[in-house]
Structure formats: C-alpha cells, structure tokens
Image: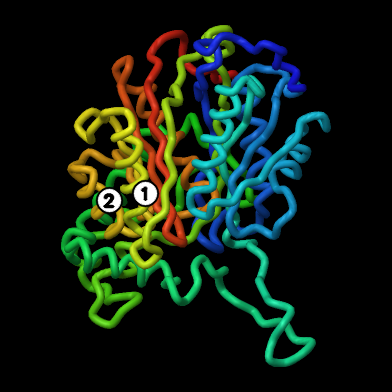
Amino acid sequence: MSPHSTSAGPAAADREPVIVLGRRTAFGRLNGGLAQLTADRLLAPVLAAALTDAGVDPSAVDDVIIGNAVGGGGNVARLALLRAGLPVSVPGLTVDRQCGSGLEAIVLACRLVAAGAGDLYLAGGVESCSTAPLRAHRLSSTPGHPDFYDRVRFSPDEVGDPEMGEAAENVADRFGINRERQDAFALRSHRLAIHAIESGRLAADIVPLDMGAGPVVADEGPRRSLTAGLLGRFTGAFRDGGTVTAGNSCADADGAVVVLVTSRRTADALGLRGLAFVDAAVTGTNPNLLGVAGGEAASLLLERHGLAGADLSLIEYNEAFAAQVLASLDLLGIAEERANLQGGALAVGHPFGASGALLVLSLLQQCREAAAPGALGLTAVSIAGGLGAAALWRWDGTGGAARRDR
C-alpha cells in the first residue's frame, strides 16, 4: 500500500490532483550542448531539483512516472531516480505514447492521485535524441547481419504509415494550410521563444547542466537571425513542391521536464498554488492525417465539459509541424495568436518524450505570472500513428508561491 493511502481514502475534494511546481533542463539541439548526456543523466538532476523545491522527504514520493519514446528500453524512470539519490523504496515507471509520452505520464499521475492510490508523484518526460540507440531487426536478407532502421512502424501498410513530414503535407493539403501561414507561425514561435528567454521568465524553471565549457542554461534552438525572407528560401523537405519545409518543422532535441503532482490536501499543506487537473482525453484518427489528432482529442474533451475554445485562457499545442498546429486550432475555432505564447517546438526543438510535459510546465509558468483564479488551460499533442492526447487544467490561484529554496 502507498505510504499515503488509507483503506477509505481521503474525501474526493482532498484528492483533486494539483501540479504545484516543475523543473526542466534547457532543450539542446541534436548533437548540441547536451549531446553527451544519456536520458537518465539528463533526467536525474531535474528530479533532484524538483524535490528540493518542494521541500518534501524523498521517501514520501509514491512513484516517478516518466515518458520516453526512443530510448534503449529498460526503465529510465527508475534508473534516473536512483541516480538522483532517491531512496530504493521509490519505484519508477516509464511510459511510451511517442510524442505524447510526457503528457501521458503527467495525466497518469493525476489519475492515480484522484483514485487515492497515492499522494505525491514526480512525472514528466525525457529524451536524448543525441544518444538514442541504433535500431536493428535480427532478421535480415543477410543472416547474421543486423537490419538497421530509422523508426518503428506505427500503422500497417494497408492503413497507411507515412513519414511524419509527409503526414504534415497531407494535413496542409486537406485543411488548406498554405506555405505563407506555416512560415509566419514558425517565425512567431522563434520570436516568442527568444522573448521568453531574454525576459528571464524561464530561468527559474531551468536546471543548469555543467557540460565542461560552462552550464547550459537556455534553449539552444531559437534563432534570432531568422526572418520571413530566410524562411521563404527553404524548399519542400518531404515532397517536391511541398509546403512543409525544414523552416516550419521542428528539430529533434535533447531535454527533460518534471512536475510535482500531488493532492489538493497536500498542496494546501505545502502552501503552494497549483494547476488543478480537470480531465483528459485520447483518441485515434486516420494515420495519414495524424497531425489533427490532438485537435480531435481536444474537441472531444471540450465537448465533454460543455466548453468551447473561447472558454480557454491559455492553449499549449505541441509544434511538431506548423501545418498540423494550425489545422488543429482551426478545428477548435481558436485563433492561432492565442496559442503557444512562449513559442514551442518549432523554435526550441522536440525531445519526443519530454515535449508533452513541457506544455504543462509552460502552462503552469504562465498561470503563475498572470492567470486569474479559475482560468482554464488546454494542452494537446498530435502523435505518430494517428493518436491525439489533450488535457484540461484550471488555475487554482490560491495559497503561496512555488517554493524556490536554492
């Protein structure tokens, strides 16, 4: 039995899941400043920092739940928590829903708190694209020689299993997302991300990682030199004459994100404001149009609660490709300028298992700054294979500020 569980369990109101704080690494470019760190070494200092901020006994953690998509198997959550110095009594769970893994890990922790299974979870995601293992099938045309491949299969041929960029082109065609609009959204992402960095608002959440030449303390992806003219010179990256380019697509990245998920009762005891979990939804769609699956999941979730896009104060949608974010926002009736106010993966990069968790941490950070009590926020991800995930949050707006004992 969890050290926080009782046979009857606390009242439902006391069990409301709340995210009270979070930490992350800066996001490094593929083969960039964090390229020498495996996933567990990226994650361990972030776990330790989150616990220090919370001021809780590490042995009180019920579980560490971490999303990871292209690691080498095993259980990176357990490996990292032991590396971070948590006691051996703390378990660990690694989950894989590809690009939605980090969000899925956080939602699972929230569901466990709501069910009374535990009271304190570290949840999030990690990816080291730079150190991801090479993949090979044992069976090959030449016995005894591995058959290497770039990515796993997500759907059978008879259904369709396009490369991610080709699927983005399909979405752009089907939903009428032109090149100019994609490029403008990508440029906006870079400019917003740069502004967020230069304003200093992200610094408190980033755990500095000393790589020998000095600590990595800021996202490496945002490009100050990017202009509309430069974006316009890119050619289609996935289809001749296509509108999806390297400029309006995300880049692979390295990074880790962790949030502390607890109950309303414990959040109140710690004196921390929180981002309350309302609900989440997952859905499937045509894998050939996978980019709108996050929008479809969000639509399902909002309909379940009798809400519309206009009822949301903040929206964080993972920016794998500009085309799919724009198509999904159109489906939801949300103006693009209302989403991703600190930029997104088009600028900072996409460490697959961590990106969904960054959406939640970004929402929390923005709520701490300016959200009114009761403000609603949405996080959503479109996922390889035609899956979509979305979560609905409410800003608590009561209690003290997040603890920063450093």
Residue 234 or residue 9, whichever sits in front: 9
State left or right for residue 53 relative to residue 306: right
Q: Is residue 197 above or below residue 226?
A: above
Q: Residue at 46% of width from left, 60% of height from top?
A: 384
Q: Residues within 10 Å of mark 2 (few under 14, many from 20)?
A: many
The residue pinned by badge 2 equals: 328
The residue pinned by badge 1 equals: 294
Quick check: marks 1 and 2 in contact, CB under 8 Å? Answer: yes
**Position of residue 279 measured from the top left corner of the image (x, y, whole percent):** 43, 30
Q: Residue at 56% of width from left, 17% of height from top?
A: 263
Q: What element carries label 2?
A: helix
Q: What element carries label 1?
A: helix
Q: Residue at 54% of width from left, 50% of height from top?
A: 353
Q: Is residue 215 above or below residue 21?
A: below
Work out which quarter of the rendered image holds the N terminus and state it.
top right
Q: Which three-letter amino acid code belongs to the residue tagged 1?
A: Gly
Q: Residue at 38% of width from left, 14% of height from top?
A: 397
**Position of residue 203 measured from the top left corner of the image (x, y, whole percent):** 46, 33
Residue 306 or residue 220, whichever sits in front: 306
Q: How far apart are marks 1 and 2 (CA)?
A: 7 Å
The mark nearer the N terminus, 1 or 2, is 1
Q: Which three-letter amino acid code belongs to the residue tagged 2?
A: Ser
Residue 167 quadrant: bottom left
**Position of residue 5 measured from the top left corner of the image (x, y, whole percent):** 70, 16
Q: Residues within 10 Å of mark 1 (few under 14, many from 20)?
A: many
Q: State how many labels appear.
A: 2
Whether residue 15 is visible here, answered yes or no, is yes
State left or right for residue 184 relative to residue 115: left
